[in-house]
Image (cartoon, coloured by chain):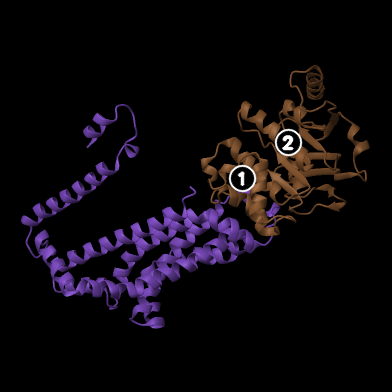
Chain colours: A brown, B purple
Amino acid sequence: MNSTETPGDAESGTDTAQISIDDVSKVYSSETSPVEALRDVSFGVERGEFVSIVGPSGSGKSTIFRIVAGLEAATEGAVFVDGEPVTEPGPDRGMVFQDDALFPWRTVAENVAYGLEEVGAPDGYTVAERVEYCLDLVDLPDKADAYPKELSGGQRQRVGIARALAVDPPILLMDEPFGSVDARTKASLHRGLLNIWTETRKTICFVTHDIEEAVYLSDRIVVFSGAPGTVLNIVSVDIDRPRNRTGEAFTDIKGQVLSYFEDEEAE
Amino acid sequence: MAGRNESETVGLEPERLGFRRGESLGLQLGALAAFVVVWWGVALVTPRNLLPLPPTVLGVLVADTASGLVFELIWQSLRHYVPGLLIGSALGMAVGIAVGWSERIDLTVGTVAGVLRPVPPLAWIPFAIIWFGLNDRGAAFIIAIVAFWINYYNAEGGVGGVDDQLLEVAQSLGTKSNLGLIRRVVIPSAKPDLFTGFRTAAGQAWMVMVAAELLGVPGIGKHLWDAANFLQMQVVIAYMLVIGLLFLLSDRLIKVFEARALAWR
């Protein structure tokens, strides 16, 4: 591999990191030849931090999402959440997918209530109150009784976020959640998500291939290389929010992230 | 038909989308009327004992309705049709879901099912007789076998079509056990297929019911066979129509429940 040391090493494995990804490799066995999806990936995500993972398609960024979520096991290495190794999905890590993954047979309110029916409402709430609070949070208070098919793509993503937030997980894992909505809807979802993040102080791990989206939202950006996925660099975005997408600092960081991909291609 | 449609919807609107409610009802009634006219015409040039005229058949239906015989026969048939359909469907759905869900069950139970599946339902008649006898239970057994397989394959297919991502979401929201996932994700998600299976089985069950009653179990089918033995073809046709009507009624009834249960689609 070209990039030998990842600058992220310094930040990984520290005691303060809520999510600690520790030397994770993933190889998919196949009948012809094994496919190496991730190689020695290490980085940490601090409590309350908003971290994006960007990379080209096939860079293994969705694989690392699935390993952190507990949907797949690492071939080598491990992921720790609050010091505990991740072995399965759980209500401490809310998940939001690209194609909303709402239960089509449940109304919006029933979708949001799903996890509450399993693990109960957080302290101080009834299920109904919690559903109402979460729908307010994503700005969909009047859609409680609608079925997913009656909603727009952006609205469905909001419901998906509300459903993940309902059980009050400390961590929100999002896999290209806004990948299939139009640009204007995307901008409004970005503002909405940042408001929610500000209000709830969740730790957010956000996978995307959209560099501008990552720069707009994140505290730090983990830049992934192509196959096999490795961490090329970790970029801090020290710009006050709300961020101006056309500002100089913004475009500088965008260019900086992009340059890692170009460097990699050049080599 | 095509001409009328074109005059109203200029352009390339697909025909299957182009009909309004009143229009389609008119077409259906027209087709039924045409069917009776053709039957009548053919019957006029056919020896009476081979194909009776529509009024003769109507006469049988009116007389048997007045005497209550139609309802008695329907009741006799329902006494094995309903239990056979319900028991066979419930078992078929349960086993189909289990086979669709678990690879282990698929490899074991599914393999055995694959061997038994090609056995024609009527080949079970000897077992129906020696296990249950020539009665409602024997006939119900044959109907249940038909219902079982139809529901089994629809349920298995429905479970196979469940979106993995929904299962992952459910797990992340705290549904851990197999039974929990089946109850809260798999069954609701597969419901359209379960309904299709049940509705298909309900239709097929009417057909196999007639054959099962050939054994001598009282009901519409038995009555139909007895009439055929005496070459009372007007009675045969009359009860063929009754079975057709029962099929339509049961199909509509299930569709009403289906539409209500699947309003989310």
**In the rendered view, does A78 fall on the left or right side of B91?**
right
Q: What residue type is labelled 1?
A: Ala
The quarter of the displayed image where residue B87 is located: bottom left
Callout 2 amino acid: Asn
Q: Where is residue A258 in the image (x, y as percent from the top left)?
A: 78, 23
Res. A221 image quadrant: top right
Q: Which residue corresponds to the image point at 29% horizontal and 77% vertical from the top-left?
A: B215
In the rendered image, the quadrant that contains the N terminus of chain A is top right
Q: Which residue is drawn at 74% across and 18% down?
A: A246
Please name whichever residue, B113 or B17, is drawn nearer the observer in this view of the structure: B17
Point 30% across, 60% down: residue: B249
Percent position (x, y) of residue A68?
78, 46
Q: How far apart are marks 1 and 2 (CA)?
A: 23 Å
Position of residue B30 measured from the top left corner of the image (x, y, whole percent): 19, 46
Position in image of residue A34 (x %, y %): 74, 43
Side of B34 where A197 appears, left or right? right
Q: Is mark 1 on a helix, strand or loop?
A: loop
Which of the labelled discs sits on residue A101, or is there none? 1
Marked residue nearer the N-terminal end (1 or 2)? 1
Marked residue chain, label 2: A
Q: Name the residue under label 2.
A: A195
Q: Is residue B175 above or below residue B120?
A: above
